[in-house]
Image (cartoon, helix red, strand yellow):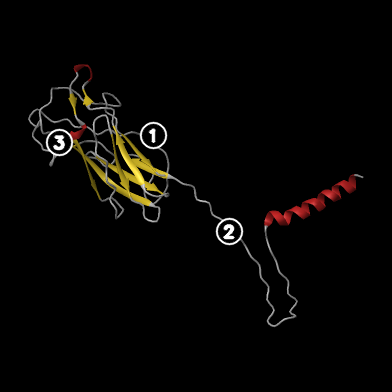
Amino acid sequence: MRTSTVFKALLAVSAVTPLLCQAESTFNNGGGSPATATARVDFQITIPKFVFLRVGNGTGTVAGGWATQALIDQITWAPTAAQVGTNTLAAPMAGSGGDLGGGTETAVVVANNGNVSLSSTTLGALNDGAAGDTITYAKIVTTASKNTTATILAAPALADAATTTITLTAVGKIVQQDAKWAYGYANDFIPPAGTYGGVNANNSRVTYTASVP
């Protein structure tokens, strides 16, 4: 009785296995001229939808190797008393910091499901805390220049308590763009003395977001 049960189980496995493998073979004994035999194989590749965004220190380039990294960079300006108010919006003062130095960040967007919406969001103008003074984000300009790709990744403008959005056009549903984003401070007026912004303080943080359909 036990042997019969094992034998039946083996027969059941043998019957199911060809269905799982989905393989094929053909035998031709040469009765025709020429003799032929065929066999077929089906293939399938499943690609997940993804979007990758990097601004500053991070892991990932347009060549691949996507990963999440939590380090947040800080761009700073500290004009001397003699420098305050001496620049213009067209020729802003270069910042310090950034993964490339000199207030410049590596910026990368890669996605595989059509056009990408790239936005920047702030909570309000930079302020100096209890003193109540502010410097508008309109005084910080972002200049994008070539990094590795032919298409330079544009930067959405910064605005107080607002989200600014641009569209990155896909080619064959793929977006692969990068740039060097250089941040500059217009420094074209004289604000009250104080420290504006900080490390996630006094509306210092800008959040960039990339999204795909």
Q: Write down the quadrant of residue 82 in the picture.
A: top left
Q: Amino acid at mark 2?
A: Phe
Circle nearer the N terminus (1, 3): 1
- Residue at the spot x=22%, y=27% of the render? 126
Name the outermost residue toward the bottom: 33
Mark 3 and mark 2: span between their CA atoms? Answer: 57 Å
Mark 2 or mark 1, which is nearer to you?
2
Mark 3, other Cα within 10 Å: few <14 / some 14–19 / many ≥20: many
Residue 79 badge: none
Q: Whole-percent x and y of residue 142?
A: 22, 41
Q: Whole-percent x and y of residue 93?
A: 15, 37
Q: Are marks 2 and 1 in contact (CB under 8 Å)?
A: no
Q: Which residue is mark 2?
A: 43
Circle nearer the N terminus (2, 1): 2
For label 3, the SS is loop
Residue 70 badge: 1
Q: Amino acid at mark 3?
A: Ala
Mark 1, other Cα within 10 Å: few <14 / some 14–19 / many ≥20: few
- Vertical comparison of 69 with 3: above or below: above
- Residue at the spot x=26%, y=51% of the render? 146
Instruction: Name the quadrant of the N terminus.
Output: top right
Report the side of 18 relative to 144 (left or right): right
Mark 2, other Cα within 10 Å: few <14 / some 14–19 / many ≥20: few
Q: Which residue is mark 3?
A: 186
